[in-house]
Image: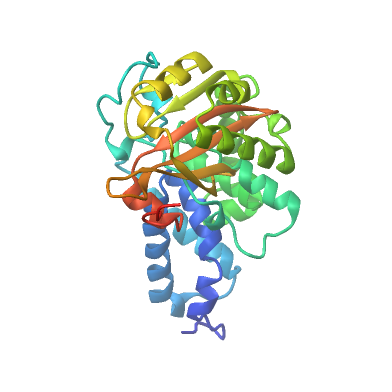
Amino acid sequence: MSGTGRTVGQDDLERHRAELTGYCYRMLGSAFEAEDAVQETMIRAWRGADRFEGRSALRTWLYRIATNVCFDALAAARRRALPMDLASPVSGATGPGAAFDDALLVGPFPDARAQSAEAADPATAAATRESVRLAFVAALQHLSVTQRSVLVLCEVIGFSAREVAELQDTTVAAVNSALQRARATLAARRGPGGGDPAARPADDVQRALAARYADAFARYDMELLAMLLHVDATLSLPPYATWMRGAGDIRAWLTGPAVGCRNSRLIPTMANGAPAFGQYRLAEGGGHAPWALQVLETSGSRITGISFFRDTDRLFPLFELPDRLAPA
């Protein structure tokens, strides 16, 4: 389809799908809602391609559409959060308890879908990983929809205040004001080291830490596991309300209510800029069946958080993990 001399094809649109998905995920806090939003963006863009006049870049035009789609989706939506924001910690001897409505929770996101294939430079890749951290995405939910969009577009995507003003049909002054308020809100919510990129381990350190964790979990070596955990490490079980803090309660949970995790097998992946694993527990009749997607949060040389996302029916296909493991 074409406007005033500018032809827009399906391939032109699809080239931007990955980065648009990352943007919509940061806005919506759900990988599944992000994919729906991007699909709606592509439909609107294709239907309106003959009205694209080429006065702005195609990429900017698509972000305008995606922003409007996200604004529509968030108009009546409730704020998403992590279990730690919605309930108090419990003893490690406590079972899963009641489940939250999925619409209340921030979900995991595959790293492979966070950015375009062209964004391969190390600095850009590192910034992208930081901007999809579970804690960061949860913190974004405390911003107004406009502040959230402005912050992500300016500080993550890299648009100028002028470009954001154009795609949001507002003024540069309004964009700068929203950006300043968004930064202040995030700074007020940032815990010690919680949002400090300098506290993140280098890639090789993070890989080594993840490998040691996988070894300890596979062997169910609680002593080694405790050595890898930060003193205030947390463990949560989305969508369940149960979460705990500290190596003692984490160990009590793994050797108590979750003792069935013994002899699990872990398949490595990456989620939210962090090491992750598809966890498979022993199944009746042999082999291993999906049980959870584990996502690790790390700082320095320690693990600060472990999230066991239990929605394996949807998450394992999203992360391209096998639906079952044959006997080893």
Quarter holding residue 238: top left
Between 138 and 4, which is closer to the camera in this rendering? 138
List x then y, in percent, for residue 69. Answer: 39, 56
Decide if residue 72 is in sight here: no
Left or right: 84 as drawn, with respect to 233: left
**314 shown above or below 65:** above
**140 shown above or below 169:** above
Left or right: 146 as drawn, with respect to 74: right
List x then y, in percent, for residue 256. Answer: 36, 20
List x then y, in percent, for residue 56. Answer: 60, 68
Write the residue at 57% across / 31% down: 181
Decide if residue 311 is in sight here: yes
Quarter holding residue 187: top right
Q: How many marks?
A: 0
Write the residue at 39% across / 50% down: 315
Write the residue at 74% across / 57% down: 121
Question: What scheme was used to colour the molecule?
Answer: rainbow
**323 shown above or below 44:** above
Write the residue at 53% across / 65% down: 61
**181 shown above or below 55:** above
Between 127 and 47, which is closer to the camera in this rendering? 127
